[in-house]
Image: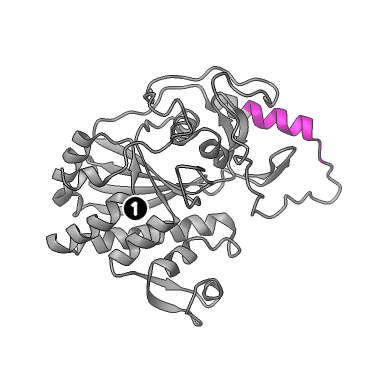
Amino acid sequence: NKYLNKINYTHDPIDPYDTAPIVLDTIPPKTPTAVPTATPVGMTPDPKATPEPTEEPAFTLAPGESYAPTEAIATIHADIDNNLDGEIMLDDSVYNVMLIGSDTRDITTYRGNTDAMIMLSLNHNTGTIWLTSFQRDTYLYIPGVGYNKLNYAYPRSGAKLLLRTIQENYKVGLSRYAIVTFDAFKAVVDALGGVTVTVTDEETQYIPRISTGGTYRLDGEQALAYCRIRYIGTDFARTQRQRTVLESIIGELKNKSVNELTNVLDTLLPFITTNIPKDELVSQISQAPKYSKYEVKELRIPIDGTWRYDILPVVTHVV
């Protein structure tokens, strides 16, 4: 109880629907044929929730091609609509938690953008921990809002809208989340005594106090800078860096003694905001010795061969 009481269980004072449960078995209605502009009933527009400028390269037309926005959008929307039908994948032996990294400095006044969206899946059937990144510029349907980038769901209406968006577009049962901010991320890495990461010569220009490539013990500030690099390899490479650091953190935790872990928890838990009930956390903690033996694997969505860049009105460059 001493440690569980350090966690923040109410995270979104500006979302009146934050306490509503996330239903795991609903299928959304068919999407409209036009991009909605009206604010959903009961929701207040957040003036700060405008998606930040894209970081992806512009979509380039082949020689002789012309761009027809209306036809292109209609085709894309039809593809999205087709993916919204079907049952949600549920399995009692798989436990999913959405790890949300927000770029806000104060989550009580502004949610921020979701620079990191990683689903952690504990698969008891296979004895694996899966880390699945979702690309922030993925163009999909946000329930109750309309077509937009995935990165728009969280600043628009909070963590539960983000989870519902992923659940209904990708058909994976997802009702739990944990949120950390920049300051939290740095504090956790420092509490661990740093994380070991191999960086390239090109990446060092974005990391403080490192000038040549190699394997380093990064402190919190350096690890955060590494995870936020977005000008080398587009956002796909950034999600890879995030998973690399997260895997390193998991490896560090596996090798800590009980005393070391309690010291880390003292620093870590006050920075975590989650909707995981206390009794559920207790159950998960009791299985920690088993989890320490699980193999860590990673994935990113979309996978190779299933995506392309495009230009759309209003939301500019999308995947």
Position above or below: 43 against 121: above
The residue furthest right is 64
Q: Which residues are magenta?
A: 67-78
Q: Is residue 24 left or right of residue 136?
A: left
Percent coordinates x, y for residue 274 in the rendering: 34, 40
User: Which quarter of the image is occupied by the C terminus?
Assistant: top right
Is residue 149 among what the camera can see?
A: yes
Depth check, front residue: 1 or 150:
1
Please name whichever residue, 163 or 159, is drawn nearer the observer in this view of the structure: 159
Q: Which residue is mark 1?
A: 297
Relative to the observer, which residue lies in front, 303 or 50?
50
| 127 is within the stretch colored magenta | no
* Residue drawn at x 27%, y 48% as measured from the top left: 128
Q: Residue at x 55, y 42 (%)?
A: 151
* Residue 140, image x, y percentages: 58, 34
Magenta-colored segment: predominant secondary structure: helix
Q: Amino acid at mark 1?
A: Lys
Residue 266 higher or lower than 3, as above or below: below
Position of residue 246 measured from the top left corner of the image (x, y, whole percent)? 36, 57
Count the labels in the image. Answer: 1
> Which image quarter: residue 188?
bottom left
The question of residue 73 being in magenta is answered with: yes
Above or below, 90 relative to 308:
above
Q: Quadrant of the N terminus?
A: top left
Q: Looking at the image, can residue 257 be seen?
A: no
Image position, residue 306 (x, y; %): 56, 43
**SS at circle 1:** strand
* Circle 1 crowding by C-alpha within 10 Å: few under 14, some 14–19, many from 20: some
